[in-house]
Image: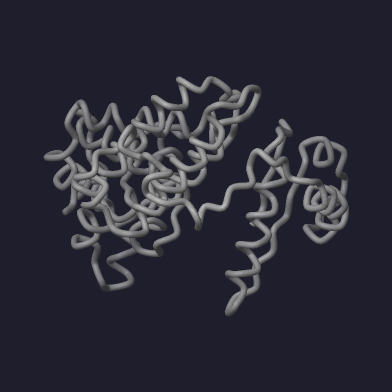
Amino acid sequence: MIETKGRIDKDVPLKVAAAVDWCKAASKQTPWNFLYVPEGVFQKFSGDALSELETVCATHRADLLAERVEAQFTLPLGEVGVADVNRTEFISPECFDALPPRYQKGVEQAVSLFRHLERKTGVSFAPPFTALLGALDEAARGLMIDLLGPDVPEDPKQLEQFFEPDVSSLGAKEADTIKWNARNLKGTIVDRKGTMPIGVLRWSLNYAKSTRQSFGGIFDTIKERFAPIASKEFVKQIEKINGFRNTYVAHQEQSLEDVEQARTALKEWSAALYDLWKAHH
């Protein structure tokens, strides 16, 4: 697992530590390692082997792991009770109770982190959304698997053709975009490990409600299966979640230090998690 990093912010050490721990936990059968690549190091790197890059970057990862994580992110999540969380501001009891336990846990962790940070100043509110992002991605992946999966052929040859769009009528750039989405859809639905499921869902919903031509295979299925749920409100909701994710959480292009902005967004993320789950249950 490789992460390239430009801007260094105060919660990077926490993220690096979490990535290293994940790799250790996932290495029971297949070995995983985490490579942290600072932008400045990569720009000066002149080697041509991944092992060389690992050696150059090793000290930077070690420094981040050794760095003291600020106390603002230390929270005994396992000890937080329902009364302490006070999650009703963000999701109704009815919606929360309808969610599977793993999604409920994501909501509780996100709200707990927000409660811990909301009275502080000069802190990043990205961690609460990081806690909820896994549940949102899983819900988006589950929706795509449930609605699109039944049309995926079992025969290996037919399966490959199903995810090979006919892009002969397109320019090179647009053709590459369609083929990239086809590969990501296959990774999400078949391999269950596609990148950024919420982003794939956003693209698919927009495609389903558009008047664009179909490219066959999976794209026919998207048009048919997603059209009933691709309402203007639902599409706008997923677009907003995906945009916020890219800007403030995943890439952190902008700093999230406004408590009211974070409060409003956390309500929207909690609502989106329920709506994603409800869309295929």
Which residue lies most toward the left here? 228
Q: Report the label total.
A: 0
Give the side of residue 251 with respect to residue 189, left or right: right
Q: Position of residue 203 (x, y in %)?
A: 34, 37
* Above or below, comparing residue 57 to residue 124 in the picture: below
Please give the name of the residue rendered at 19% of the width and 62% of the height, measured from the top-left corner.
150
Please give the name of the residue rendered at 44% of the width and 40% of the height, measured from the top-left corner.
111
The quadrant of the picture occupied by the C terminus is bottom left
Please give the name of the residue rendered at 37% of the width and 49% of the height, measured from the top-left corner.
82
User: Front-most of 26 and 223?
Assistant: 26
* Above or below, comparing residue 140 to residue 43 in the picture: below
Please give the name of the residue rendered at 22% of the width and 37% of the height, measured from the top-left corner.
208
* Above or below, comparing residue 157 to residue 176 in the picture: below
Q: Quadrant of residue 228?
A: top left
Q: Position of residue 3 (x, y in %)?
A: 67, 47
Q: Position of residue 174 (x, y in %)?
A: 41, 33
The quadrant of the picture occupied by the N terminus is bottom right
User: Front-most of 73 and 217?
Assistant: 73
Q: Position of residue 40 (x, y in %)?
A: 82, 35
Give the side of residue 55 with respect to residue 208, left or right: right
Which residue lies most toward the front here? 83
Q: Quadrant of residue 236?
A: top left
User: Front-most of 197 and 45?
Assistant: 197
